[in-house]
Amino acid sequence: MSKVVIEAVTFRVDPKVSAEEFAKLAAATRPAVAAMLGFRRRVLSVDAEGTWLDHVEWDSMEDAQAAAQNISQQPSFGPFSQAIAAGSGTMRHADLAMVHEAVVDA
């Protein structure tokens, strides 16, 4: 049985690129990511020190690894990748262990 896999990529953006500009570049990659086999959800965040986290959920480790290998072939990822500061990225994959969501009273 496949397990949901979390892909966590941390990086810094080139100082010449504003957070707003980078968010637009990231948004341009949405159709390509959504079309990848096993894609579930993606969340992009940035902390106060300027470190970004690209959090992606996949149906399986195989799907996550295939996407990581093929992402550079997607044209929309050229500008996105070029805006990331050289040598600042790290990628990890891990099995999802728990989900905790807010409960809204009806």
Image (tube, grey):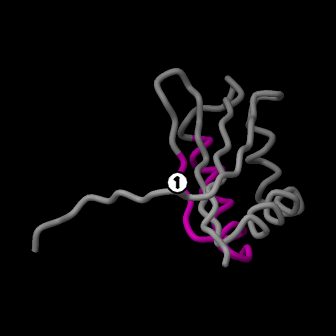
Instruction: Using the image as rendered, state which of residue 15 and residue 93 is in the foreground.
Output: 93
Q: Residue at x 68, y 60 (%)?
A: 29
Q: At x 79% / y 68%, what residue is drawn? A: 62
Q: Is residue 61 magenta?
A: no
Q: Position of residue 58 (x, y in %)?
A: 64, 67
Picture coordinates of residue 28 (x, y %)? 66, 59
Q: Residue at x 45, y 57 (%)?
A: 98
Q: Position of residue 34 (x, y in %)?
A: 65, 72
According to the picture, the residue beneath numbered tag 1 turns out to be 43
Q: Is residue 87 above or below residue 98?
A: above
- Dividing the image into 4 quarters, which one contains the N terminus? bottom right
At 62% from the left and 42% from the top, the residue drawn is: 22
Q: Quarter of the image for the C terminus: give it.
A: bottom left
Could you say whether the residue bearing mark 1 is in a helix, strand or loop? strand
Relative depth, front residue between 38 and 44: 38
Amino acid carrying label 1: it is Val
